[in-house]
Structures are given as C-alpha cells and as structure tokens.
C-alpha cells in the first residue's frame, strides 16, 4: 500500500505534536533544571547551599571561590543516624569562611527528645555559626497532632541547650497540612521549587531562607546541589549567627 502525501503530512503532524507534548511534560517535571535561575539570583545578594553525604567529597576551597556565602550541612537523622560527611563538611566550611549551620532530618516515628539528644551530641554550635535547623518533610504515618508536638519539643530542647532559636525547614503544602497555624514563631527555611518567588505556609508571614532548586551547580561539587537564597544583606545574615 502506497502512502499518499496527505497521509504523510498527517503522520508528520502527529509526530510533531507528540514531540511538543513530550517536551512540555518533560519541562514541567524538570523545570528547575532548565529555568534561567540567574535572572532570579539577580534579586538576591546572598546565596548558599545545603549539603549531605549525597554530594560526596566537596572541594570547599572552590565552593568559597564560587561565591557561596552560607551552607547548611546535614548532621543527623532520627535517633541514631549520623551523616558520614558531616564532620569534614562542618570543619571545612568554617575553614573556608562560609557561614555554616547544621540540620537534623526529623523522623516523626522516633521520640523527639532522642532525636534532639543525638543532634546535640554531634553538633557544637559555636559563636559565628548559623542557628540549628530541623528538617521536616516526612510524616512516617503520624498524625498532625503528633508531628506538631514532637517538632515543638525538639525545637525547645535544642534552643535551651544551644541558646539559639532553631530554624524550621519544610515545604508549604506539607506545613499547611500537618502544622496548620502552629510553629510560626520559628524562623522559616522554605523549600519552594520552580517558582520566581517562594510560597509561604499560612503560619508564617515571611521566610528567612528559600531553597529554590535541587538541581543547582556549584564549582567544587560534582553533580546537583540544593541552592538557597537569604533575602537580606550579608550583614543581616551575619546578625543571625550564634553569639
């Protein structure tokens, strides 16, 4: 059977339409890989990253030269997990004049005091360090009431022991669903991806840090790294440090 010219044109139309649809779907799924984030960055003077063992061995000298001004570093998770890269990253960030802060990945299924004690046993917040951070992004099947109670207890214990009010890291929809109007008294580090400006959960009026992509690139780090902004000046960022 011979394919006619009208049939060929129709086939090509379907092919082109299919490619366009595939491109739109791919862009929607991976938009933060392709967005011209430099145009967003121009609105902020203070840029930072957050890292864990997933970034492998980091060349902090190159990170410093790349203009990174602050870094949040994973320290602990749950009641027993210590990030294997924490000790080195913690030391190297300070050595290379990058403001550092440590974070704990919170597991709602584990007693909050045990988690706080693990974090405090591995992190010594020194003058000049950024406040400790609680990373809240999973439920472990626990109810909003249990999550709120545990998070508040962790924050209270860590603040009492360090003398510094912790920061809460979370996502807008997660916070609205599981925290509601609670915990808005703590500084917010919001993960709001693929946006020109961050979405803020209803318990907060403003954000302190904004994680805007999981797919940033920074010299000294092989592969993707989370990138963040601070909305103020370098002097205002330094004012947040532990005394």
Image (tube, rainbow, N blue to C red):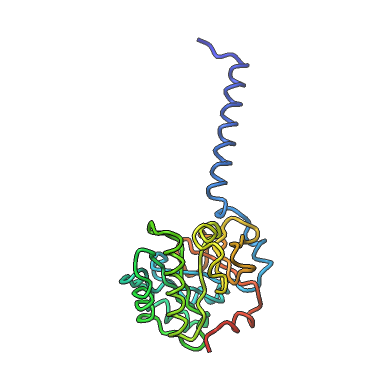
Residue at position x 50%, y 83% in the image: 164
Q: Is residue 219 left or right of residue 199?
A: left
Q: Who is closer to the viewer here, 94 or 60?
A: 94
Quarter residue 200 falls in: bottom right
Quadrant of res 114: bottom left
Q: Considering depth in this image, is 44 or 77 the residue closer to the camera?
A: 77
User: How many labels were placed on the picture?
Assistant: 0
Q: Percent position (x, y) of residue 19?
A: 56, 35
Residue found at x 56% / y 57%: 193
- Above or below for 17 versus 218: above
Specify the farthest residue to the right.
43
Front residue of this view, candidates 239 and 155: 155
**Residue at x 64% of width, y 65% of height:** 41
Nearest to the observer: residue 228 or residue 121: 121
Q: Residue furthest top?
A: 1
What is the x, y in percent for residue 77?
A: 37, 69
Place residue 192 in its image quadrant: bottom right
> Could you tell me residue 1's position as x and y percent?
50, 10
Q: Extreme left residue here? A: 80
- Which residue is pictured at 65% across the width and 61% down the height? 197
- Residue 68 lies, in percent from the top left, at 55, 74
Determine whether 130 is above or below 32 in the image: below
Does residue 168 appear to the left or right of 78 in the view shown? right
């Amino acid at each position: 059977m011979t394919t006619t010219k009208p049939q060929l044109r129709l086939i090509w139309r379907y092919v082109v339409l299919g490619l366009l649809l595939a491109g739109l779907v791919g862009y929607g799924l991976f938009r933060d890989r392709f967005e011209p984030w430099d145009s967003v960055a121009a609105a902020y003077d203070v840029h930072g990253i957050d890292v864990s063992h997933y970034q492998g061995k980091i060349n902090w000298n190159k990170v410093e030269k790349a203009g990174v001004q602050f870094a949040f570093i994973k320290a602990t998770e749950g009641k027993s997990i210590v990030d294997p890269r924490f000790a080195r990253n913690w030391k190297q960030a300070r050595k290379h004049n990058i403001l550092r802060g440590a974070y704990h990945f919170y597991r709602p299924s584990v007693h909050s005091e045990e988690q706080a004690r693990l974090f405090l046993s591995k992190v010594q917040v020194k003058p000049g360090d950024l406040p400790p951070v609680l990373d809240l992004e999973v439920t472990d099947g626990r109810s909003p009431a249990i999550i709120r109670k545990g998070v508040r207890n962790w924050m209270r214990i860590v603040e009492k022991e360090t003398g510094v009010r912790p920061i809460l890291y979370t996502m807008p929809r997660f916070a609205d669903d599981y925290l509601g109007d609670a915990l808005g008294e703590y500084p917010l580090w919001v993960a709001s991806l693929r946006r020109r400006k961050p979405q803020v959960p209803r318990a907060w009026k403003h954000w302190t840090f904004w994680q805007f992509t999981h797919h940033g690139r920074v010299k000294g780090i092989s592969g993707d790294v989370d990138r963040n902004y601070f909305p103020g000046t370098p002097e205002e960022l330094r004012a947040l440090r532990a005394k």
